Amino acid sequence: MVDNHQPIFPGETGETGETGETGYTELRRHEFRKNQVVLVDGHLTTNSRSSEGGVSARAYRDGYWGFASAPGAGAAASADTTARMQRQAEANARAMARFGAQPALALPGGTYRGEHVFHGRAAWSQTEAVQYLAELHAFCAQRFPALKSIRMAMTDEHHSKWLRTSRGGESLASIQRAALRITFSAEAADGAPVELADSISCKGSFADLPATLDELAPLLDDLHRHLMAKREAVPARGGHGVMVLAPELAGMLAHEAMGHPCEADIVLGGAVTRSLLGQRVASDLVTMVDFAHTYDGAEIMSPVYVDDEGTPAVDAVLIERGMLRGLMHSRETAARLGQPTTGSARAYGPSDEPLVRMRNTVILPGSAKLADMIAGVDQGYLLMKTANGQADSTTEFMFGITLGYEINGGRLGRAIRDTTLSGSAIKVLQSVDAVSDDMYWTCSGYCGKKQPMVVSMAGPALRARAHLGGQ
């Protein structure tokens, strides 16, 4: 727990602002460091280490927010700096009142006091990271001599956020994430280049990745096998049909297509979900949750115990057995919509304001077996990997598909060329007739919404109907 006698900001002992129902202030000291190493065909192309720190203040006065930030971390985050940022934030909030009077909300949300830091293995130096990738490249080059190119990128980042609020909250929260992405390239039968990538990710730093050669060999073998199948890939038959979405795609569908429209600030901006609360948006087999920090009794990949407004983080049940039940909230959106807070307001960098963001967005597993789901398809596709995804507030989405196979008579057929999957997430989820009993987790990417954000996502396999692009 936070020691009450040791202030979060060195030298600061004063109050952080008003404690009334409609007056609110928060102070955040944020330190952020990131390491990246990239090897292309055994050649080191990136070897970077960056760090950033700053102090920010946010004040709610007379129905408006004011925000101010300044660079500096550690000893640089002096009492003078924090006091100056607080005064500037309050002045900015009052300056906003020139746009016209508006009701001041009684901001809900509790108070949190505590510390949460992941303690993993001793961190590698940049030299150790470079040496590791060089060894991994040599292993792949020897094991798969037909490859034309091998690219490897390893990234880790560590965020520490000390927060104090005018309601008595004091907390230290951290997000620590590491990821390794491996891309294999080969030449197709017609001479065209083909490539395929896979990633692993974890809490912690490079040293915490499950990345010994013995641990990675099965993943590398699968990646190579699928790439060889893509060398003989055929175009997909375009149109609406039955798709078995592997767990990786189900996680993306949960995050992009339904997760963003369930962020309450997007709902207030006009998302279709506002009018659908309490209504059916998916089949009875679909339950979707944005978990705060724990799943099935274990801490998950991007744990959030307290958000960047000092609100205790709780799970947000978004879809329950097909019915849209809830949203993800900040203090303000919860007040505007008259709903409980979820502790979902987060800021990526020291100079960013907190926005409503996903944390660990999941479609819960069902009871079917993936093999049986495939066997039940007369004609369709198994879609396994996606390169990217985008969606809008209507839940319309489009994902790039980088690995898929035909299904004919319940059996897997030829690999298909890169294509796109699109549709309405609501219509796709309403068509789900099978959900597998397995689960795939990843925290290797970023969520984009004005600012990036570290998130994780997970899902089982889903069988549904959607539109696949053709030639």
Image: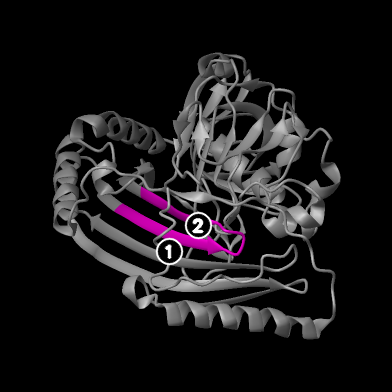
With 298 as the anchor, is 188 left or right in this view? left
Residue 37 lies in quadrant: bottom left
Q: Residue at x 78, y 58 (%)?
A: 268
Q: Which mark is residue 48?
A: none
Over which residues does the magenta segment extend? 154-177
Task: Look at label 1 and name its amino acid.
Answer: Ile
Residues at discs 2 and 1 in contact (Cβ within 8 Å):
yes
The residue nearer to you, when weighing 397 against 381, is: 397
The residue nearer to you, when weighing 205 against 181, is: 205
Distance (Cα) linking label 2 and label 1: 7 Å
The residue nearer to you, when weighing 467 against 329, is: 329
The residue nearer to you, when weighing 224 against 239, is: 224
Residue 152 in picture, x, y percent from top left: 28, 51
Question: Which of the marked residues, 2 or 1, is nearer the chain's N terminus?
Answer: 1
Q: Which residue was labeled with disc 1?
A: 8
Q: Which residue was labeled with disc 2?
A: 170
User: Is the C terminus in the top left, top right, bottom left or bottom right quadrant?
Assistant: top right
Q: Residue at x 49, y 24 (%)?
A: 413
| Magenta stretch prevailing secondary structure | strand
Is residue 331 depicted above or below 244 in this figure? Answer: below
With 432 as the anchor, is 360 left or right in this view? left
Q: Is residue 344 visible?
A: yes
Q: Secondary structure at mark 1?
A: loop
Counting every numbered tag in the picture gives 2
How packed mark 1 is, by other alpha carbons closer than 10 Å (few <14, some 14-19, many 20 or more), is: many
Task: Look at label 2 and name its amino acid.
Answer: Glu
Residue 47 in picture, x, y percent from top left: 23, 63
